[in-house]
Image: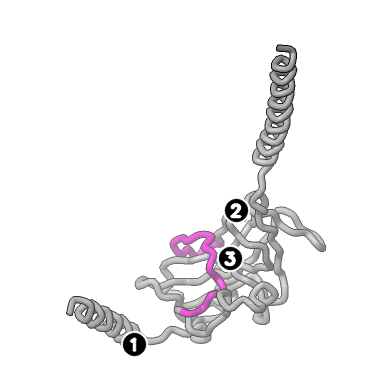
Amino acid sequence: MAIHKILFASLLICSLIQSSHGAEKVRLFKELDKGALDVTTQPSRQGDGVVLDAGKDTLNITWKLSAIGSKREAEFKIIKVKLCYAPPSQLDRPWRKTHDELFKDKTCPHKIIAKPYDKTPQSTVWTVERDIPTGTYFVRAYAVDAIGHEVAYGQSTDDAKTTNLFSVQAISGRHTSLDIASICFSVFSVVALVVFFVNEKRKAKIEQSK
C-alpha cells in the first residue's frame, strides 16, 4: 500500500507540473524582436587561427540599442549577455541543440553578465571561464522584461551564425605543479627502491659472514 501511495503521489505531482507548464504560453525565439541590440566582441588576441585559452584570455563585449530600435523597448528591464555555441560546435551534440522554444533551447548555456537596461552603450571585459569547453562561439544579449521573459535580442554574428566567430581551447586538466609533484614522487620511489635493495644486500652479506 505504501508503494502504491508513493506512486500515486508522484504521478499527481508530475501531472500538476505539466499542467502548470501547459497553462503558460510557449515562448518562441522567432517571436523575439530580432536585432534590437547591437552586440560586438573583441577578443584579447585576434588573427587567423587564433584560439583563446580558457581561464586566461578575455573578451571585450559591448551592447547598445540598435539603430532600428525595438517597439518593446519600454519592457526592457535586464540585459542578459550569454556565450553561445556556433553551429560547428553543435554538430552531433544534441545537448547543445538550437530549439525555437526558448525553454528547450540549448544554444546559449553560458552566462556572462546580467545588468539593468541602460539606453547608453554598455560594455564588460569578461575572462573566458576555466570550465568553458573547447569550441567555436559567439555572444548574444537578451533583453528581459519584469517577469524574466526574453522579449528581444541581438548577437555578435549574423543570422546564419557564420561571421565574427571565435574559438576557445579548454583547460586540459593538467597543471605544472601536478606534473612536478608526479615527477618528484617517481624519483622518490626509485630512490627508495634502490635503498631497499642495498640494505637487503648488506644484510645478506652480514648473515653470510656470520
The local crowd at label 3, few if under 14, some if 14 to 19, many if 20 or more residues have their Cα within 10 Å, is many
Kindly report the distance in space between the C-alpha atoms of the residues bearing marks 2 and 1.
Answer: 38 Å
Q: Amino acid at mark 2?
A: Arg
Who's the residue at 53% across and 68% down the image?
109
The C terminus - image quarter: top right
Q: Amino acid at mark 3?
A: Leu
Q: Between disc 2 and disc 1, whose residue precedes?
A: 1
- Verify CB contact (< 8 Å) between mark 2 and mark 3: no
Is residue 172 visible in the rendered image? The answer is: yes
Q: Where is 27 relative to 193, above or below? A: below
Instruction: Point out the residue furthest to the right here.
Output: 48
Coloring basis for residues: one colour
Q: What is the span of residues highlighted in magenta in the rendered image?
A: 104-121
Residue with the mark numbered 2: 130
Helix, strand or loop under label 1: helix
Residue with the mark numbered 1: 22
Helix, strand or loop under label 2: loop
Kindly report the distance in space between the C-alpha atoms of the residues bearing marks 3 and 1.
Answer: 29 Å
Relative placement, left or right, of 104 versus 4 is right
Relative placement, left or right, of 200 versus 66 is right
Q: Where is 78 relative to 200, above or below? A: below
Instruction: Point out the residue furthest to the left here.
Output: 1
Helix, strand or loop under label 3: strand
Residue with the mark numbered 3: 83
The quadrant where residue 196 appears: top right
The local crowd at label 1, few if under 14, some if 14 to 19, many if 20 or more residues have their Cα within 10 Å, is few
Q: Position of residue 195 (x, y in %)?
A: 71, 24
Q: Position of residue 201 (x, y in %)?
A: 74, 22
Q: Of residues 39 and 121, which is closer to you in this image?
A: 39
The N terminus - image quarter: bottom left
